[in-house]
Image (cartoon, helix red, strand yellow):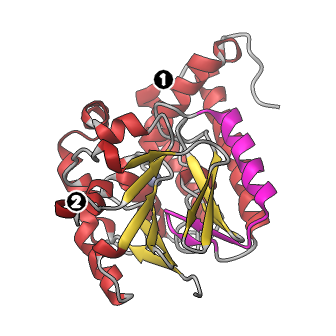
Amino acid sequence: MQSQVHVLDTRQLGRPGIIAATVLETSDGLALFDTGPESTFDNIAAELARAGFTPADVRHVFLSHIHFDHAGAAWRFVETTSAARTGATVYVHPRGAPHLIDPTRLVDSATRIFGADMQKLWGRIAPVPQENVRVLQDGDVVRIGSVEIRTIETPGHASHHHVYQWDESVFGGDVAGVRIGSGPPIPPFVPPELHVESWLKSIDKIRALNPTKLYLPHFGAVPDDIATHLDQLEERVRRWSCWFRDRIIAGEDEPQLIQPFADYEAADLLAGGATEESVRDYETADPSFMAVTAALRYWRKYHPDKITDGAQPSP
Ligand SMILES: [Zn+2]
């Protein structure tokens, strides 16, 4: 059978083109790559219906990582047919699995970041039954009917991040960049696991797969040359992390950096081809204030020697 990929739009907060869930048709039902947040489950069900399917046709859910915009609806795809205990299998990194099975700590830490907006942004969070969770290690291959899905461990955005390869396609997760509308690829720096060196190695791993299609959760298939996309992403990982380092050396702290970084990012997006409207969509997909928390934590934790008074600013 001809396998087919559909990019489903979750219409997060009523906006198109911000969070995708990408589905692959196989001879053993649908494989879904990230689910979107639980709050948009009905929108995904409607998108599936347009393609001739229902949520119960989703037999396999591959998670890039467990942040709520990617994994929040996973439990709904398990629950769909749970009366028969035949809900979807959810595939995840070993360090993500415990938080799917018991999301209490994840909810607590997200509530510290998003506060009263939790419900509006992400909907209801519930556990995924352990028997439906399957842990995947780097290099693991899952055979589904006639297709093979290969797991590639790709930390940087999160320490528990995977991308998945099928044939010449890669389902990229957030480590492969956020790219919205006519804008450029940017790296979503989020706390608490940002690790720049790992991110650069993960970009190299994606390059080595030499994909002809790269699907982004934010948002959809990369529309042009994938090598250029990855080069531009790498350049921003390096430049943005150095921007933060120089400001930490200059003595600026988190509250002082939030607006300057929002302005720096917006200028970078506009120069890279984004419209004013899509700058707001980037902010919805990847709020800029999170990059400030993430980058400060990264430099203080991993390179305290490089942010002291005597440290040299970027070359
Ligand atoms: Zn994301």
Is label 1's Cβ within 8 Å of ligand 1?
A: no
Kindly identify the residue that appears in the image at 74 percent across and 73 percent down.
212
Query: Residue drawn 55% across and 31% down?
Result: 295
Residue 203 vs residue 300: left or right? right
Mark 1 or mark 2, which is nearer the start of the sequence? 2
Q: Is residue 88 above or below residue 253?
A: below
Residue 137 horizontal side relative to residue 107, left or right: right
Q: Nearer the viewer, residue 73 or 101?
A: 101
Residue 297 image position (x, y, % from top left): 51, 24
Residue under circle 2? 79
The residue shown at (64%, 41%) is: 240
Residue at the front extreme of this rendering: 84
Type of the residue with mark 1: Asp
**Nearer the observer, 83 or 42:** 83
Q: Which residue is mark 1?
A: 253
From the viewer's perspective, is residue 17 above or below residue 160?
below
Q: Which residues are magenta?
A: 195-222
